[in-house]
Image (cartoon, coloured by chain):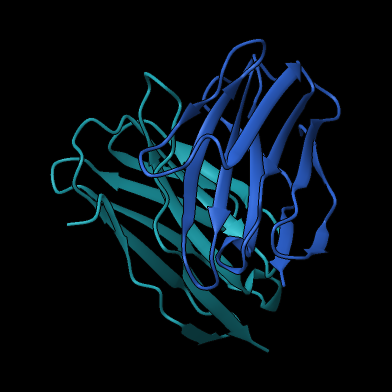
Chain colours: A cyan, B blue
Amino acid sequence: QKEVEQDPGPLSVPEGAIVSLNCTYSNSAFQYFMWYRQYSRKGPELLMYTYSSGNKEDGRFTAQVDKSSKYISLFIRDSQPSDSATYLCAPGLGSNYKLTFGKGTLLTVNP
Amino acid sequence: GAVVSQHPSWVICKSGTSVKIECRSLDFQATTMFWYRQFPKQSLMLMATSNEGSKATYEQGVEKDKFLINHASLTLSTLTVTSAHPEDSSFYICSALTSDSYNEQFFGPGTRLTVL
């Protein structure tokens, strides 16, 4: 079993839709959970991160963590064509700052 | 936010030659930098952790003699792919940790290496 599982998609939605992106992980030692966005042929950019179970909201984005089920989600409200990118979940260990990336979900928001 | 640059952004080389990729933190000092490799439609795979002034720590399966990492200053780390072969063709990305946001990695734009 891979440490981080993420459905690669592709996921195609109409503009304005609510998008749900999900990952599962197996290592209960992960202490913090990052979401990165990566445009084609570019480096990832950090969207959000959270340390604990529960929800964290930032504008149109909400990150959700359920440590008991080892499940992390990113919700995008009122999706825009500019949100079209690959979204990577990346849980991390606090001891060495290493991140373990999921495969990424390719999202396309159609105008 | 913190800015990380990479140079070159794209390089093509012949098989058997060596290629050096630079990673710079432009507006902050980075005691720790990471090097990743990403194949098409695959995730980022950590290759090594680079700490300023000390030897890099390589992940299992990564050949340290093939991928030479030097972190000579708080703003510069280099990755040298020695005796490159076509299977080394990939997207190489670095990231850096800031001192005031200890677990937030800022990524460079990546370097696309093509070995002919």
Is B62 positioned to the left or the right of A111 in the image? Answer: left
| Residue B36 horizontal/vertical position (percent) | 56, 46
| Residue A11 horizontal/vertical position (percent) | 46, 82
Q: Is the residue A24 above or below the residue A65 in the image?
A: below
Q: Quadrant for the N terminus of chain B, please.
A: top right
What residue is drawn where x is 62% and y is 62%? B85
What residue is drawn where x is 16% and y is 57%? A1
Q: How many marks?
A: 0
- The outermost residue toward the front is B16
Is B102 positioned to the left or the right of B9 in the image? Answer: left
Is B98 positioned to the left or the right of B6 in the image? Answer: left
| Residue A14 horizontal/vertical position (percent) | 56, 88
Is B1 positioned to the left or the right of B89 in the image? Answer: right
Quadrant for residue B113, please give it.
Answer: bottom right
What residue is drawn where x is 23% and y is 30%? A29
Viewer-proximal residue among A92 and B6: B6
Viewer-proximal residue among B109 and B12: B12
Q: Is the residue B78 above or below the residue A9 in the image?
A: above
Quadrant for residue B71, please give it.
Answer: top right
Viewer-proximal residue among B80 and B102: B80
What residue is drawn where x is 37% and y is 31%? A51
- The outermost residue toward the top is B53
Viewer-proximal residue among B14 and B77: B14
Q: Quadrant for the C terminus of chain B, please.
A: bottom right
| Residue A4 horizontal/vertical position (percent) | 30, 53
